[in-house]
Amino acid sequence: MSMRFALLGEHPVAQAVAETIATRPDLELVRCCLPADRPPAARSPLSQVRPARNWEELLTDREVDAVIVGEVSEDWQAAVRQLLQAGKTLLVPPALVQSTAFFYELALTEGETPGRIFPLLDWRAHPLLAEMRQHLTAPTLGPIRHVQFERRVAAPSTGLMPPQTLAAALLRDADLLRYLFGPYDQVNATRSGDLPAGYSLATVTFSGSQVPQAVWTATASPTESGWKLTVLGENGSAILESHAADSASAPSADWQLTLSPASGSASTRRASPDPGPWLITQFLARPQNPMNSAAASGRSQRVAPTSVTPDATATPAESKSQWDELACAVELVDAVERSVKRRRTIDVYFEAQSERGLFKTQMTAAGCSLLMITLVAVVAYLLLASTLSLPDWALKVLLVLTFLPLGIFLALQLLYFVAQPASRDKR
């Protein structure tokens, strides 16, 4: 029996996936819930699908196995939560689940319910991205010397980038950088501007032990959105860019790849693919698919190590799942927020203790040790006092020496109320 899907919302990537499903004989699109003022076009495959009034109808609809969520507003998080708890498989835009707290809530819910989540990482479907990665591993560019990612965010009215738009663009770009170069585990971020108005400039430096350093910048543009990735190597350079508004709410638009080898002429290629077929292929081949569980377990020993980006020809069952890849990008975005707040470099997977926390740990250990030493000293004092005939002054001296270290230590604790922490440590 074929898998049955429902479309919920009007996100362009979600609609592209739904239209692909509607044209495949092995899959079935059975429900469609779009805004009343924006119905599907007459010639669209979605026009032949039975409509649904709201997402609550899908909770108890046994005809629906998976729901394609086409909304990115936080108002739809409750719908995602309840559909997942109802056991539905969800195909969601990353911008909808990128909130760190909500993301990990879904991860816990996914482990306790039969429902599953598949993020629609549509930019990974672009053929120029796969071609770019092939050039990075081939001697075309040679050892990488510099990576620069420049993002332009349209802000025609205020000239400032809204925090939500900036975070969605950073999530997309961070995953793109991980896809091309490998795992980044250190970030350093700065921003110009203030909440809630927005930012005029944002800069993030991504670093890692086995990956080239990448500098990501975002600036407000009065006209259009777009981005440009520049990679400089010893043997040449490559520029991957898009001048269309394909940030976080639209599918992969027209991209351009320009290769400039040190010896030879530059070449340029353009492509504007439909991400629907690629995303459906990835979804059906996911490790959680019961049809692929046996194949995935049989190939588990051949999974590429996390320090190496999976090969472009590898199937999802042989590489990290899309959910795991999105989790890594979400952690990078969260580390960027912490870096801006603390004004320093953040290790994504290891957070060193602060000096104040380290001091508290050391003092706690010292106090426990003194209590044990004092206990042993009291027992020794009682043994000496009962077995030896010592003068009174000697017994008093021994008694004072027994409790003196503990008394000094307890007296030092009163300094806590004198030495108040700096205001930055209180945050």
Image (cartoon, rainbow, N blue to C red):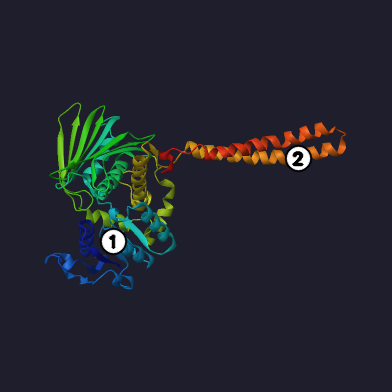
| Nearer to the camera, 51 or 346 | 346
Residue 181 in the image: above or below residue 323? above
Q: Crowdedness of circle 2 by 10 Å Cα count: few (<14), some, many (20+)? A: some
Label for residue 75? 1
Q: Position of residue 158 (x, y in %)?
A: 17, 46
Disc 1 versus disc 2: nearer the observer: 2
- Is there any visible trace of residue 183 in the rendered image? no
Q: Secondary structure at mark 1?
A: helix
Q: Position of residue 283 (x, y in %)?
A: 31, 57
Label for residue 349? none
Q: Position of residue 339 (x, y in %)?
A: 36, 40
Q: Position of residue 297 (x, y in %)?
A: 43, 54
Residue 242 in the image: above or below residue 114? above
Give the CA separation, mark 1 to mark 2.
65 Å
Left or right of 268 on screen, residue 193: right
Identify residue type, mark 2: Val
| Nearer to the camera, 320 or 303 | 320
Label for residue 378? 2
Q: Quadrant of the N terminus?
A: bottom left
Sooner in the amino-acid sequence: mark 1 or mark 2: 1
Residue 394 in the image: above or below residue 274? above
- Whether pointer 1 and pointer 2 mark residues with C-beta atoms closer than 8 Å, the reply is no
